[in-house]
Amino acid sequence: MKTRFILVILVISFLSGICYAQTSSVPSPKMNRKMYKQFIDLHLTYPEASKKAGIEGLVKIEFTTDTEGSVKSKKIIKPVSDEIDKEAMRIFNLIEWNPAFDYGIPKAGSGEFELQFKIKKYDKLVKRRGYTTLESQYKSDTSYNIYNAKQLDTIAIPILNNEETNLYKYIYQQMQYPKQAVELGIEGKVVINFIIETNGLPSNIIVEQNVGGGCTEEALRLVSELRWIPAVKNNLAVRSKKTLFIEFRLGIDGSGNYIPNQTNPGF
């Protein structure tokens, strides 16, 4: 009887540990894992002097957030070089964070951010993405503040790679309706929030409303491939918020060639 009692206590303790592990979390990027990796691949710049000197390594940043996910403190606890440390901190400052959670309740918390600098890997990345750095015609704001449309002098403008000047039309020209969604008759609207950075690249791409059958993934591809002339405030290129509503509607024949009427408020 005593053995059974001890066993019950051990099982309860084990299950409690599992429950705690599943309901407590440290601060995490608002982007999902795939979008986070893509974000790093799009934005990372290897400092030229460090690259020429063959300097590589892992930078580690320790930070704290409040209950809203805002970063309250940060410090480099594993440096590599002044230039590389500065770039790692720049990338860190671009990331929007979820707060830590305890049993579903947001709380102040701490976390660590790591960024690896490898020259061969970076060279392959640059070749794949087609650029080393992107520059704006305006001097960039360095505050990392994010503005909405009403706060801007000029909103961000999409750069479209053909003669099309309407973002809405361009999106649907580029859309590849997922085969699975066509076969299953899936339609719907994907809502995506993101930030347009001072260099015109998207960041912090977050899905607010999903559609199945591969539609969400296709919408993410479309948004990720867009490039922008950044928003302007006080003659500086600034970070700005953007929301796109990307609709998936099947044609009368059940194909994915249907383009909805052009009243979409997301553009």
Image: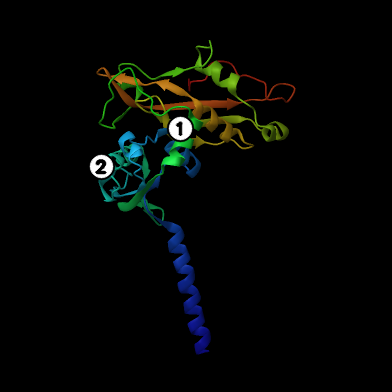
How packed mark 1 is, by other alpha carbons closer than 10 Å (few <14, some 14-19, many 20 or more), is: some
- The type of residue carrying mark 2 is Asp
Residue 146 position, x and y percent, is 32, 30
- The type of residue carrying mark 1 is Val
Of residues 49 and 68, the one nearer the viewer is 49
Residue labelled with disc 1: 126
Secondary structure state at the residue bearing disc 2: helix
Q: CA distance from mark 1 to mark 2?
A: 22 Å
The reply to whether the C-beta atoms of the residues labelled 1 and 2 are less than 8 Å apart is no
Of residues 240 and 203, the one nearer the viewer is 203
Q: Residue 180: which disc?
A: none
Direction from residue 13 to residue 248 in the image, left or right: right
How packed mark 2 is, by other alpha carbons closer than 10 Å (few <14, some 14-19, many 20 or more), is: few
Secondary structure state at the residue bearing disc 1: helix
The part of the image, by quadrant, that contains residue 187 is top right
Residue found 28% across the figure and 39% down from its top: 83
From this view, report whether residue 99 is shown above or below residue 238: below
Is any atom of residue 31 visible in this view? no
Residue found 43% across the figure and 58% down from its top: 23
Q: Earlier in the sequence, mark 1 or mark 2?
A: 2
Residue labelled with disc 2: 82
The part of the image, by quadrant, that contains residue 123 is top left
Residue 126 position, x and y percent, is 45, 32
The part of the image, by quadrant, that contains residue 185 is top right
From this view, report whether residue 12 is shown above or below residue 66: below
Residue 87 position, x and y percent, is 31, 38
Of residues 30 and 138, the one nearer the viewer is 138
